[in-house]
Image (cartoon, rainbow, N blue to C red):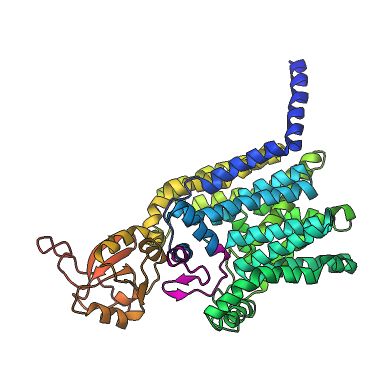
Amino acid sequence: MSRIVETISPQRATRVDEFWENAGTQTLVLAAVCLAVFFFVLGYPALFDIDEGMHAAMAKTMVVSGDWVTPVFNGEPFFDKPALYNWLVAASFVVFGFTDFAARFPSALLGTGCVFLTFAIGRRFLGNKAGFFAAIVLATSLLFILLSRMVLYDIPFTFFTTLSLYFLCDALFGRQRKSAFLAFYVAMGLAVLTKGLLGLAIPGLAIAAFLLWTRDFARIRDFRLVSGALIIAAIVVPWYALMELANPGYIEYFVVNQHLAYLLGNAGDSAGRHPQPVYYHVVGLLLGLFPWSFLLPGAVYEAWLLRKQKAQAPTVFLLFWMVCTFVMFSSASSKLITYILPLYPAAALLLGKFFADMVDAPQKKRGHFTAALALPAAVLLMATTWVLANGAPEQLREETGFEWFDIRVTIIAPMILAVLAFWFAWCKRRALAFAITSAVTPVLLLFVYTLLIPDAFAYRSSAQISATYESLLSADEKLVFSDKMFDAAIYNTGRDARILRGRDELHGYLEQEPRVYLLARTDSDSLVDCEPGLAYVVVTIGNKQILSNKAANPGGDDLPALPEVQCRVSAD
């Protein structure tokens, strides 16, 4: 028996070594992972309200109107973001038609692009194992998967910043050719055209911090700043100029309200839009990078220990890229969990090197260290399960439609995987622990999409109820909303909407003589203490309802009358 084991072990080791050297095989594995986590049932569920429907509606308007310069939402120019992402979604609509899959396809494609850029950076500058591990870490991180399946700006912006990181590493530590620097500026220009001046700030801060640390200021002349500025200007100036011509005052608004206000919190209409404490992104990173986040401190510490080794300069630069991006967004007055996504590839690369070093140096006592860092993940999942088993407020069900049994079932499988990963890490079966950990988030999201999303869909999206609303309106009528914007309804119907703000506007609209309809949440504040007989419920789906000011059924007088809306009573 021992002879058989001795024969098999070298063969197994040979196959493993061949895998690490074979970029083609690793590419196929990564492609399969990306196809599973980013593209599986990409068009399901329908687009959610709050941003997804809005961005899709702007791209749809571009295709229908033929105006590809000014993004328009609900009949008004949209000035908050540049147009590159809208163009990508619009192009997807042209190819695939106006479908939810088409709206999300650019994010899924560019999310896949981020994974492969991370893979390329890692293989070239950190080693074959580090590149593969880093790509898997990024592709299986919770927030990265979710955003790669949504119609939002964050993944496209992260793709172009990661592209700039790739060419910058090539320029600093690779061939150091002029073409690498020029390609770096092209990527920066595309980032600026996706989300504004942050496309300059993220690479700029990382470079400045790295050069200050190394004191190698002579490298500045290698950056060809004049050529770079011209390249960036050639990419971004034409669209910004056209926007200013079509919408005078746009550039002032974009610079002051969308950038100075974001950083300072005391200028323009955007000030204080998402105020959060300075430690907000610490919690956000722990959640967004799950299940790898508890291992990140160890990876950062290991990278810091290498800071004086010239051969490890790429690792140190990645550390500066991650830290500078984190500090910049933490210092800003406005914060959302999605803002720090551009640092995820750098964090994944540091984690990739961390895992690769453990595999290459099994004699080091990192197995127990890894297990200790993985322990909080297992404890967190078990604690969450315990809380859910003891009940939760009814308010969450009213907001999401979640059933508590489904939540418990959803959380159990990832918890089991996390505990298994912890056990194998403790036993120094590091490769197996890594493989099991990489399955935690995909399994979690599989249960979410099969058990939770069907319940939550009617609560988080107006797509379903908008079909009924559309059937009640004449060809030229607008949608009417009470208090809230239902942007998925705008996208699905292709109609603009009027929003009734407050109780007086709502009452004035419903007191008209002709029959009218509106879409409102069942908990709308404007329905507090409303008069009896003011509104009647046409249909209720989830936490949304279509109301009419007439009691007769819109299908005809021979059908039952509509039920009178149950107006809420104020606490006073």
Q: Which picture quadrant has residue 226? A: bottom right
- Asked whether 500 or 108 is in front, the reply is 108
Q: Position of residue 518 (x, y in %)?
A: 29, 70
Location of the N terminus by quadrant is top right
Residue for point 65% across, 65% down: 191
Can you say whether 478 is above or below 416 in the image? Answer: below
Can you say whether 270 is above or below 383 in the image? Answer: below
Q: Position of residue 369 (x, y in %)?
A: 74, 47
- Asked whether 85 or 378 is in front, the reply is 85
Residue range corresponding to the magenta coloring: 61-85
Residue for point 70% across, 51% down: 118
- Asked whether 233 or 81 is in front, the reply is 233
- Queried whether the magenta region covers residue 73, the answer comes back as yes
- Asked whether 255 or 328 is in front, the reply is 255
Location of the C terminus by quadrant is bottom left
Left or right of 570 on screen, residue 209? right
Residue for point 29% across, 75% down: 527
Left or right of 524 on screen, residue 363? right
Left or right of 326 on screen, residue 502? left
Residue 461 visible in this rendered orientation of the protein = yes
Q: Position of residue 165 (x, y in %)?
A: 73, 59
| Count of numbered circles in the view | 0
Left or right of 327 on screen, residue 275? left
Residue 423 visible in this rendered orientation of the protein = no
| Residue at the far left in the pictured view | 558
Q: Position of residue 390 (x, y in %)?
A: 45, 53
Can you say whether 114 is above or below 60 in the image? Answer: above
Can you say whether 197 is above or below 313 in the image? Answer: below
- Queried whether the magenta region covers residue 113, the answer comes back as no
